[in-house]
Image (cartoon, rainbow, N blue to C red):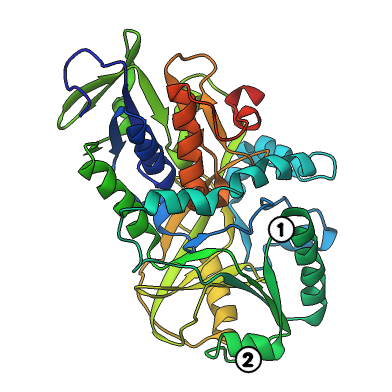
Amino acid sequence: MVAASSAALPSSVIVLGAGMVGTCTALHLQQRGCQVLLIDRRQPGRETSYGNAGLIQRESVEPYPFPRQWRKLWQVLWQSGADVHYHLKALPSLIGPLWGYYRHSGPTLYPQVVQAYSRLIAHCLTEHQALMRGIVTHDLVAPTGYLDGFRTSAAWAAAVQDAQRLADAFGIRHEVLDSVGMAEAEPALRVRLAGGLLWQEPWAVNDPGALVGRYADAFVQRGGTQVQADARQLQPQGAGWQVQTPQGTFEAPAVVLALGPWAAGWTQTLGYRMPLFVKRGYHQHYAAGGRLNRPLLDAESGYVLAPMQRGMRLTTGAEFARVDAPPTPVQVAKAEALAREWLDLRDPLDDPPWLGARPCTADMLPVMGPAPRHPGLWFNFGHAHQGFTLGPVAGRLLAELITGETPCLDPTPYRASRF
């Protein structure tokens, strides 16, 4: 246990944020002999890590780029699709980060981004598997893969070519399914699709928040301390850091900022100006109707249907807004109308729909490593759509850096000093 109201121990670390990234960081530090205090205002896994499509995405070697096709940009501008929505009031504060996002999505910089990003993704399954040893997860996790479904033959044909490119470049395994194959893979579908792609390596998780909770429970059972408190109570103290909680005052020479979409406010307070922004997303559960065997992306419309313990979960695309702006779940209605063409969805459970935020950077790479101007402060945030996938490898990399081990991969592309 991290010492309360006493001098800090050299091997103690405070981790702020108990989502997938923060919880995995705490576990990896604990495995290396550190005394760790894990802090979040809510129970572990109840924010961003709770509301995703429940996928550990080994195939996702390329981060989502900013669209550059004029037809797509026009659709985004007029918000005519179901995949993108934005708040006009938020745009002035987003111009800088979004311009950086657009620039890094171009033909010169994007290949460099992919190389750095794919090196992280390559470890996602093995690192999740390593953390799962000794933890009961068989009721939550299944290696089903997941499907991309296509409404038109042209989009399917283009995707098949692109999937082969990923197979050649990164060894990503997939299976091409025609209309009959899609119907056989998912008998509950109400329509015959043009075709699909079965990504064979991803794992599906039927309660993402519960998996984070199991990791956090293991952390506590192995001697870690988990406290529900406001991270804003953190402040420098001597050569280290101090945080006040309902359980007492805790000190440590090192602190990890793993606050996901709230990291932007924190880093600004500390004087850092990084091109951070959020993509908000919604989900809705349906208790009755058809049920899929595995998660399914409507590749031309940008929503996912995923079988969960609570029912079928419909997740939306990206909403560009301030993290604390009031909900505007217009994408849920659009996606639901499209999804009901494919699957019988009845008895919605979430009122209002769940809302969360993905923490993003302009260059699509996470921020992992030491804070440039604050000794003992470490960053681990900005994993965008893949924090749930990358949590274990991100936690391992940061723990290795903090404890002076040889890191499992070159941390240079992810350091905050790049900004």
- Residue kind at label 1, given as amino acid type: Gly
To which quarter of the image does residue 222 belong?
A: top left
Q: Check the image and report above or below for 104 versus 356.
A: above
Camera-near label (1 vs 2) is 1
Q: Secondary structure at mark 1?
A: loop
Q: Check the image and report above or below for 87 versus 30.
A: below
Q: Check the image and report above or below for 179 versus 35.
A: below
Mark 1 or mark 2, earlier in chain: 1
Is residue 51 visible in this depiction of the protein?
A: yes
Picture coordinates of residue 412, whole percent (x, y): 64, 27
Tell me the residue that label 1 is attached to. 171
Compute the Cα span from label 1 to label 2.
Answer: 32 Å
Picture coordinates of residue 415, whole percent (x, y): 60, 27
User: Residue at 55% of width from left, 17% of height from top?
Assistant: 372
410 or 278, which is in the foreground?
A: 410
Is residue 43 visible in this depiction of the protein?
A: no
183 or 323, which is in the foreground?
A: 183
To which quarter of the image does residue 403 belong?
A: top left
User: Residue at 67% of width from left, 62% of height from top?
Assistant: 79
User: Residue at 53% of width from left, 77% of height from top?
Assistant: 336
To which quarter of the image does residue 116 belong?
A: top right
**The C terminus - image quarter:** top right
Q: Secondary structure at mark 2?
A: loop
Crowdedness of circle 2 by 10 Å Cα count: few (<14), some, many (20+)?
some
Tell me the residue that label 2 is attached to. 191
- Residue kind at label 2, given as amino acid type: Val
385 or 402, which is in the foreground?
A: 402
Picture coordinates of residue 226, whole percent (x, y): 24, 39
Crowdedness of circle 1 by 10 Å Cα count: few (<14), some, many (20+)?
few
Give yes or no for contact between labels 1 and 2 (Cβ–Cβ under 8 Å): no
User: Residue at 66% of width from left, 25% of height from top?
Assistant: 418
